[in-house]
Image (spheres, helix red, strand yellow):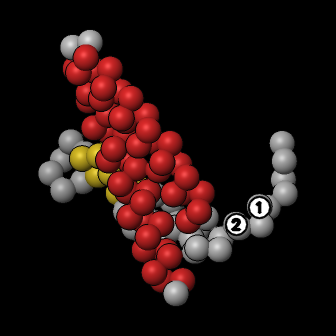
């Protein structure tokens, strides 16, 4: 595994760890939270990957009448939003 730190690592800032995603069973609770201290650049890259997966799952789910893929798209989109929002908070804090 490559242990070298990329040159742009942390340039934009770091995740703050306040954004959550996916509703819990109890009203007002959430299942997942973004971890603080992750590189915002990397978080945004991963959000892009999640959104691409969500787009593909949504398209296939609708075209093939597969509701489970549409739900997967919903969950992936929620995760991507949390990552993007948290990275943005870290970028604004870094300015």
**In the rendered view, would you say 73 is above or below 15?**
above
Identify the residue at horizontal 55%, vertical 52% (top origin).
Answer: 45
- Element at badge 1? loop
Identify the residue at horizontal 38%, vertical 64% (top origin).
Answer: 85
**Residue 66 lies in quadrant:** top left
Q: Are marks 2 and 1 in contact (CB under 8 Å)?
A: yes
**In the rendered view, would you say 78 is above or below 83?**
above
Residue position marked by numbered label 1 in the rendering: 6
- Labelled disc at residue 9: 2
Percent x, y of residue 18: 39, 67
- Element at badge 2? loop
Is residue 31 visible in this depiction of the protein? no
Identify the residue at horizontal 48%, vertical 48% (top origin).
Answer: 48
Mark 2 crowd level (few <14, some 14–19, many ≥20, 10 Å Cα) = some
Mark 1 crowd level (few <14, some 14–19, many ≥20, 10 Å Cα) = few
- Labelled disc at residue 61: none
Is residue 82 visible in this depiction of the protein? yes
Q: Is residue 73 left or right of residue 40?
A: left
Percent x, y of residue 33: 41, 56
Percent x, y of residue 44: 51, 57
**Residue 12 lies in quadrant:** bottom right
């Amino acid at each position: 595994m490559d242990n070298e730190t990329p040159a742009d690592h942390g340039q934009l800032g770091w995740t703050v760890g306040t954004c959550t995603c996916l509703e819990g069973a109890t009203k007002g609770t959430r299942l997942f939270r973004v971890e603080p201290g992750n590189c915002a650049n990397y978080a945004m890259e991963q959000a892009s990957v999640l959104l691409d997966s969500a787009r593909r799952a949504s398209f296939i789910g609708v075209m093939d009448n597969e509701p489970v893929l549409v739900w997967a798209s919903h969950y992936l989109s929620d995760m991507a939003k949390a990552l993007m929002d948290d990275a943005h908070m870290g970028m604004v804090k870094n300015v």
